[in-house]
Image (cartoon, rainbow, N blue to C red):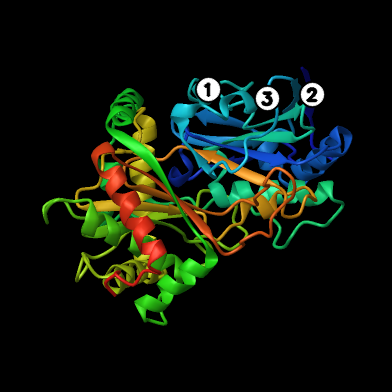
């Protein structure tokens, strides 16, 4: 194995300190992904592109600090980011037709990722980088794999994607997309917290220890299975037509279909059915004073929908989801919700607690990346030939991504750019019921789906 520390060139951080908002304090979390390329990447070009990207994004080359047990800081100290390279002679080729979201029980990605040590961040280590990159060459197939690990305190998945897209573009000798990143945080005042929004924030008000969340996850692995549902672009268009409402998006209707299928075919009575949905919403660009479109931080909130008027109707479920997203664009409501959540996140960080991952009573959680085509945005020039993978979900946590390009063993097939994969965990006893209902709907072109 070879490894290097890649510094920003030229250095631009100048030890400037960025104080983090409470909303950034996902200290114990990191985002890990893998990208698979069909042929060589040039290591020297990767190093140069990473140096240029870090120069434009000096926050990433910084270190996490805790000052006076109260102020959480990233000092933009122009440190090097670890880049490692290893050759793998065991794997014949990257498996064909893998899902985007892989089941962690299969442990396919671990060997390809050099994970950020959040445990060191929690102990206040000044030595732990906030980003790690590992490159693996599959000797037998000639494929190259890039594993990335991103400390969540740097920003959410959108910020992470923008950084990697800039890295990919610099590698291709292209200029980064506008706008340029802004790192200064909006610091919230506890006095602006609003008790009336606490029902939206139960996962933050009822914090638990990391050990409790871990033990819960271990139990769920024995009671639940991961399920991956794939839709073609044509199928999603057909579902959208069925909903019959122009204000609804394809995304709204896709999520509504998953919930409708669960309610109709998997739950035995009305005491079990899903009656509302929580959605992770990106609030950049709603109000620039809160977060502009170029704000690279943690800018996501959980919105709770009202109860569905009819939990067995595709359009009724989709409308509730759409209304909750529209409400998240209300600047006054957004201000109250964020100020309150910020204080709760600070409390969790102070007490070494995490947000509560207990299943939502009569609800599910939608955390979607459907807007962002990761395989396209981080392709390093291999257009329609880069495959992207994430790992893991949770009970009734819907993770949604664009479909990967498909290689059939001899050639690359035309890519379905408008299709989607939905992954979530479901009780073992319900899994086959869901799959059979979904497959029947696909075969019948959704004619039995209640509008």
Q: What residue is shown at x 53% (from left), y 44% (from top)?
A: 99
Tell me if residue 111 comes above or below residue 233 in the rendering: above
Residue 113 falls in image quadrant: top right
The residue that mark 1 highlights is: 124
Residue 419: x and y in percent read 54, 61
First in sequence: mark 2 vs mark 3: 2
Q: Residues within 10 Å of mark 3 (few under 14, many from 20)?
A: few
Return the mark for residue 4.
2
Looking at the figure, which quarter contains the N terminus? top right
On the image, numbered disc 3 is attached to which residue?
A: 91
Q: Give the foreground label among 3 and 1.
A: 3
Q: Residue at x 61, y 61 (%)?
A: 416
In the depicted structure, whether residue 375 falls above or below residue 427: below
Residue 61, position in %: x, y? 70, 35
- Find residue 133 and report its horizontal and vertical position in percent: 69, 31
| Among numbered discs 3 and 1, the one appearing first in the sequence | 3
Specify the quadrant that holds the C terminus: bottom left
Q: Are marks 2 and 1 in contact (CB under 8 Å)?
A: no
């Amino acid at each position: 194995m070879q490894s290097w520390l890649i510094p920003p060139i030229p250095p631009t951080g100048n030890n400037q300190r960025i104080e983090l908002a409470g909303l950034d304090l996902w200290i114990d979390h990191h985002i890990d992904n893998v990208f698979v390329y069909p042929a060589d990447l040039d290591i020297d070009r990767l190093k140069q592109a990473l140096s240029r990207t870090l120069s434009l994004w000096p926050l990433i080359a910084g270190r996490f600090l805790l000052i006076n047990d109260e102020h959480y800081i990233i000092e933009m100290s122009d440190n090097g980011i670890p880049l490692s390279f290893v050759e793998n002679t065991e794997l014949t080729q990257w498996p064909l037709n893998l899902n985007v979201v892989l089941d962690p029980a299969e442990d396919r990605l671990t060997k390809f990722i050099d994970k950020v040590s959040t445990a060191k961040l929690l102990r206040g280590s000044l030595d732990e980088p906030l980003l790690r990159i590992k490159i693996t060459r599959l000797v037998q197939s000639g494929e190259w794999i890039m594993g990335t690990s991103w400390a969540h305190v740097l920003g959410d998945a959108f910020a992470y994607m923008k950084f990697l897209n800039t890295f990919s573009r610099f590698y291709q000798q292209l200029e980064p997309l506008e706008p340029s990143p802004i790192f200064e945080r909006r610091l919230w005042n506890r006095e602006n917290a609003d008790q009336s929004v606490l029902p939206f924030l139960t996962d933050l008000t009822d914090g638990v220890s990391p050990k409790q969340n871990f033990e819960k996850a271990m139990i769920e692995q024995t009671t639940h299975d991961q399920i991956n549902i794939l839709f073609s672009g044509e199928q999603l268009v057909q579902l959208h037509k069925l909903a019959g409402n122009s204000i609804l998006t394809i995304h709204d209707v896709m999520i509504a279909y998953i919930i409708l299928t669960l309610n109709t075919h998997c739950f035995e009575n009305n005491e079990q059915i899903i009656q509302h949905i929580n959605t992770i919403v990106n609030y950049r660009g709603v109000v620039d004073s809160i977060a502009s479109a170029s704000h690279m931080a943690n800018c996501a909130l959980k919105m709770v929908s009202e109860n569905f008027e009819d939990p067995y109707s595709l359009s009724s479920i989709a409308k509730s989801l759409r209304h909750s997203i529209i409400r998240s664009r209300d600047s006054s409501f957004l201000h109250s919700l964020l100020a309150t959540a910020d204080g709760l996140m600070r409390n969790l960080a102070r007490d070494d607690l995490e947000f509560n991952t207990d299943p939502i009573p009569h609800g599910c959680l939608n955390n979607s990346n459907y807007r962002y085509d990761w395989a396209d945005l981080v392709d390093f020039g291999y257009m329609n030939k880069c495959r992207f993978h994430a790992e893991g979900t949770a009970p009734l946590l819907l993770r949604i991504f664009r479909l990967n390009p498909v290689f059939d063993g001899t050639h690359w097939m035309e890519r379905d750019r408008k299709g989607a994969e939905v992954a979530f965990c479901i009780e073992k006893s319900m899994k086959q019921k869901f799959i059979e209902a979904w497959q029947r709907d696909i075969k019948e072109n959704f004619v039995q789906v209640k509008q």
